[in-house]
Image (cartoon, rainbow, N blue to C red):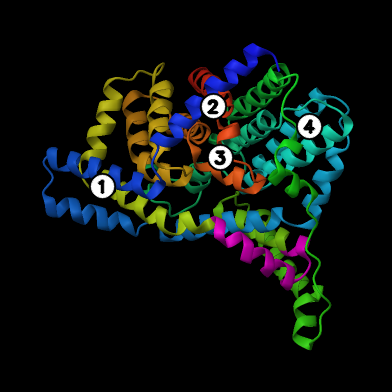
Amino acid sequence: MHPAAEVERGRLDRFASLVARAVPDAITASVILLLVLGAAALVMGNPGGAVMDAYYRGLWMLLPFTMQMTLIIVLSSALGSTRFFRSTVEKLAAAPRTANQMVALAVLLTAGAAYVYWGLGIALSPVIAVHFAREAERKGIAIDFPFFLALVAGANAVWQFGLSASAPLLMATPGHFLEKSIGVMPLSTTIWSPAAILQEVLFTGLLIALGCGLMPKRGRPISAFPGAMEVAESKPVVEPPAKTGSERLERAPYFALVLCVVLAGWLWQHFAVKGLSLDINSLNTTLLLASFLLHGNFKSFTRALERAVVSAWPVLVLYHLYAGLAGLIQFTNVGEKLAGLAAGVSSPLTYPLLTASMATVFAFFIPSSGGQWAIQGFITTKSAAAVGVSMQRGLLAMSVGDQMGNLTSPFWYVVISGIARVDFRVFFGYGLLWAALWFVVGVTVFTFAPC
């Protein structure tokens, strides 16, 4: 590798390690925010009893949303483990003939998966990286695996304005926690707005261009990382032959097909007959249908669930803690004060930058788009109305900051590194490049493009 590139990589790694040591785990971070918001509420004149009541009221107001997000994580992981996805990745990895082709196809494949469903992108991006890197080494193509893994993981950012975008889907679902004040936001005004589509296209194109241009010429191959090589070379688990009648029933495809027909019928009723749009419930129904179809039987599906459920543990508790913080903001005067402060220092031209910057700070403590919107949504919509911009622009600008936090804090890197079986610190620093790209493009687009 060129000495200058080696020095730059060393600087990025040192900075990434510093950030990793400074950022606490999600539960600790929620307690820190609780102390800060609780103290702010008291200083702003709210009685102690009212502050406690606001936190408790919020603590349980996201119960349906918590279960919806749990299903999104579990079902996506189960879907990504199917033989179909694994074989598809292996076949596509064999197609590129140059390093630039490897970069372009891996990024587009990950971005496509993430756009369809964010959990699918998280589950597949490390699998895509290890299989493409293994194929590159086999063909003698120079690919720096840590850089490549960070690059492919960065393509997951497109999920923010994809079909499973948590905050836009929540706001498009009747009964959401802000419906009484702002109503329901159709997806045509958020993730399918001209600005959101432009953001997706520009970011993906620039990510490919920078990935090709900045790839170290003599990097570290995947064979230098034994854990990642094991992932690339592992084979699907083969089920032993069924011995009993109950085992044969579990592995028979017919019962799974019955459920598929029922779920497909409901989706037809939802979209074609009633003319309703995509929301969290219809997305989960689609994921459940796809999981049954691709696993083929209940035995394979339940085995995948056993492995997938461990990935959902943060949501089961953290969303309640985030909801409690949302309660402090929504049921005391803290939200109104913060919204007034944000509006006071904003103009229509600076509002997206300030909103994205504030969201970036929140995202360091809250590694969840839905959880962040639960806390920041009230402030964002109030300040947008005060400044004179659309609430949709506020939501989309907040999503830019949310993903900026995802790209600069260790939470999701640790998830990806666990699947790829490498230390997240070896590729974490490179993610800061894509974070800067995402932020600059996002703030520019949502300042000037129509939405």
In the rendered image, is residue 186 in sight?
A: no
Q: Residue at x 69, y 13 (%)?
A: 2
Which dot, 3 or 2, sits closer to the camera? 2
- Distance, label 3 to label 2, CA atoms, is 13 Å
Dot 2 amino acid type: Asp
Q: Residue at x 58, y 25 (%)?
A: 434
Q: Residue at x 79, y 37 (%)?
A: 132
Quadrant hosting residue 224: top right
Q: Are marks 4 and 2 in contact (CB under 8 Å)?
A: no
- Distance, label 1 to label 3, CA atoms, is 30 Å
Q: Give SS at disc 1.
A: helix
Which dot, 1 or 3, sits closer to the camera? 3
Residue 394 disc label: none
Residue 46 place in picture, x, y as percent:
13, 45
Which dot, 4 or 2, sits closer to the camera? 2
Question: Circle 4 sits on which residue?
Answer: 105
Which dot, 4 or 1, sits closer to the camera? 4
Of the numbered discs 4 and 1, the one sitting upstream in the chain is 4
Which dot, 3 or 4, sits closer to the camera? 3
Of the numbered discs 2 and 1, the one sitting upstream in the chain is 2
Dot 3 amino acid type: Tyr
Dot 4 amino acid type: Leu
Of the numbered discs 3 and 2, the one sitting upstream in the chain is 2
Question: Circle 1 sits on which residue?
Answer: 328
Dot 1 amino acid type: Leu
Residue 413 disc label: 3
Question: Circle 2 sits on which residue?
Answer: 13
Bounds of the magenta span? 292-311
- Distance, label 2 to label 1, CA atoms, is 37 Å
- Distance, label 4 to label 1, CA atoms, is 45 Å
Residue 78 place in picture, x, y as percent:
67, 59
